[in-house]
Amino acid sequence: MLSRRAFLKYTGATALTLFTYDKLGVRRALAQVPGGTLDPTLVTKYLTPLLIPPVMPKAGTIKMQGGKQADYYEISVRQFAQQILPADLFPPTTVWGYGAVTSASKNGRGLLIHNAPSLTIEANWKRPVRIKWMNELLDASGNFLPHILPVDQTLHWANPPGGLAERDTRPTFASTPGPYTGPVPIVTHVHGAVGVGDESDGYAEAWYLPAAGNLPASYATEGTWYNFFASKAAAKFGVTWGPGFATFQYPNDQRAATIWYHDHTLGMTRVNVYAGPAGFYIIRGGPDGDGAVIDTRSGNQAVLPGPGPKENDKFPPNKTYYEIPIAIQDRSFNTNGSLFYPDTRAFFDGIPGPYIPDTDISPIWNPEFFGNMMMVNGNTWPFQTVERRRYRFRFLNGCQSRFLILDFSNIPGVAVWAIGNEGGFLAAPVNLTVTNGNHLVMSPAERADLIVDFTNVPVGNYVLGNLGPDEPFGGGVPGIDFPVADPVTTGQVMQFRVVPAVAPDPTTPPQFLQLPAITPLPAATITRPLALLEKLSEFFPDAPAEALLGTVAGDPNTGVGTWTELHWDDDVSENPAVGATELWEFYNATPDAHPMHVHEVAFEVVNRQPILVDEATQQVQVDIGFAPNPPEAWETGFKDTVIAYPGQVTRIRVQFKTSGQFVWHCHIVEHEDNEMMRPYRIGPLQPGQPT
């Protein structure tokens, strides 16, 4: 059976060939699912209650320049042991996670917890948040801790051993190197933060090492952009950065939304995030917040399911939560409890070498990775007890490469409504039970704000399923266009234990919710055709060497456009003016769907349309025989991540309001780490910025 890549290569060599994700009729199964030495079928499911992340304690309140108040946090990344697998059956797992190191309140001192995923940052609309992000990946003696996962040194990565001259480069080697064993760089990105300055966005080349006592003298201790951004932060906020930390500020003047934070170090995001550092960041209030939702029956403010965790709540909690953030991640483990992540390219497609420098294949990097166990809020296959009433679940797909298709259809009588996504509330509630068979597709990094109504569900235990594949995703119908996830392992996410309601449900039924009106963006004045590409090896058949982005010259909407491959260190090619609204078109010339994320902005999904792809001439063309498809109902409003399906152009409308240097990239983190990320600049070059 032909792989998708082989099919595309064969047909594209002869003519412009239409391929769409639901018409290929072939499947690729290159990714291996087994994982580490721990057999996932030996891990008992639904023994552990779902951990509901408490709220991150504040270090205090500060008065900013001009007198405005801001919430202040001091948060570090540390290494620790956490019970992820079922307790008493398996040992704890060494992970990394964020946690507050100080609390202004007495109750908050009991929440100085480092965990993976980390505690939730609760922010209020238009009230800034300032965070001192600290790299404390140190041992008890203050020496640096090496990475707990294999780091490929042949990628274009942070490269601290390169010193000032060679940091943030793709180093050269006389022979194939082993994994990097030095101090670990980090830089934190709040994914979905809109209007943040570039100094606080977590730019991939603004990383920093821990302030360890044994740092090699020849190593670069900060990334290329660190000092430039430190100077900007000092001028804007009056803060000083130093060894092992940086202080960022977030305005929170966007719509109320579910966003999240994670590491974003150049060429290392996949292994840093897999190790654990990530958490929810929820913005509440304002004209588009919960208080603006109306009950159409009365015209009064609607009642949404709640409460969720609040600041200074006890932990473990002594109250019942009806609003719960749920982060779904896939992981693999070894029998000693340690995380498994592949240390050889042979894991993905059996290539045993030779590797760089003798070929173009990196020795450790894998084009995608799929864990063989589902982890939810830091535990494998947990359960959550729910009453026969409505709940609000804020879902995050935190997987490396895995597209989820959440499947509620095994819960009889359930009703599932989507009310929000990455950019806040939708234009109107979407009944996923009626319109979508109780299914919801979620790419890596996407969020979904759902009301799940258990009112008519019989008392009993039910499983939230996953129909997404255990391999790269190209869209289509589960079980027809691709094999669904293993029903014994990755096809199960978590268990709901339904019990009788303890009181009448006071919340507004979703069909009577009037969500805040969406103010559309202005009309676009510039269209940017962009390419999503894949570079195959020149030494091994059907083997991806890199994932790439690029530009398209010509007008593929009316004729043929020719793409140009670009790498991370090529000159900026996307330079919108401050205040401009543009139409970005993602022409996907690869066999995979890609979750495309644009930093700094929230955008509107416009439409999708089939395209013709010719690999031989590197050309794309819109197939005018097919009309554009509008966005899915759950993609209305504003988003920061969108699925770009293979064989299609995906169009988004974006307004750029804040000047500075940012990035756009695929959020399959293995792709992002090997060239599928590009810098872009809003406005003019900044005096003194790195070049």
Image (tube, rainbow, N blue to C red):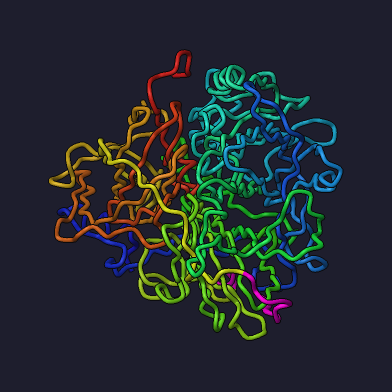
| Residue displayed at 30% across by 38% down | 582
* Residue 634 rendering spot, x and y as whole percentages: 42, 61
Residue 57 lies, with reference to residue 349, above or below; the image says above
Please state if 201 lies on the left or on the right of 435 as rendered: right
| Residue displayed at 74% across by 68% down | 49
Residue 418 lies, with reference to residue 255, above or below; the image says below
Query: Is residue 359 among the parts visible in the rendering?
Result: no
Query: Is residue 457 among the parts visible in the rendering?
Result: yes
Q: In which quarter of the image is residue 145?
A: top right
Depth check: give the residue in front, 36 or 191.
191
Q: In which quarter of the image is residue 44?
A: bottom right
Please state if 587 lies on the left or on the right of 182 as rendered: left
Q: In the rendered structure, which segment of residues is drawn in magenta?
A: 489-506
Q: Specify the quadrant that holds the C terminus.
A: top left
Whether 652 is among the magenta residues is no
Residue 246 lies, with reference to residue 257, above or below; the image says above
Depth check: give the residue in front, 5 or 78.
78
Q: Specify the quadrant that holds the N terminus.
A: bottom left
* Residue 534 rendering spot, x and y as whole percentages: 35, 46
| Residue displayed at 45% across by 71% down | 432
* Residue 683 rendering spot, x and y as whole percentages: 38, 24
Depth check: give the residue in front, 339 or 440.
440
| Residue displayed at 29% across by 45% down | 585
* Residue 66 rendering spot, x and y as whole percentages: 62, 21
Residue furthest right as drawn: 106
Please state if 194 lies on the left or on the right of 145 as rendered: left
Residue furthest bottom as drawn: 458
Whether 505 is among the magenta residues is yes
**Total number of numbered labels?**
0
Q: In which quarter of the image is residue 624?
A: bottom left
Depth check: give the residue in front, 119 or 568.
119
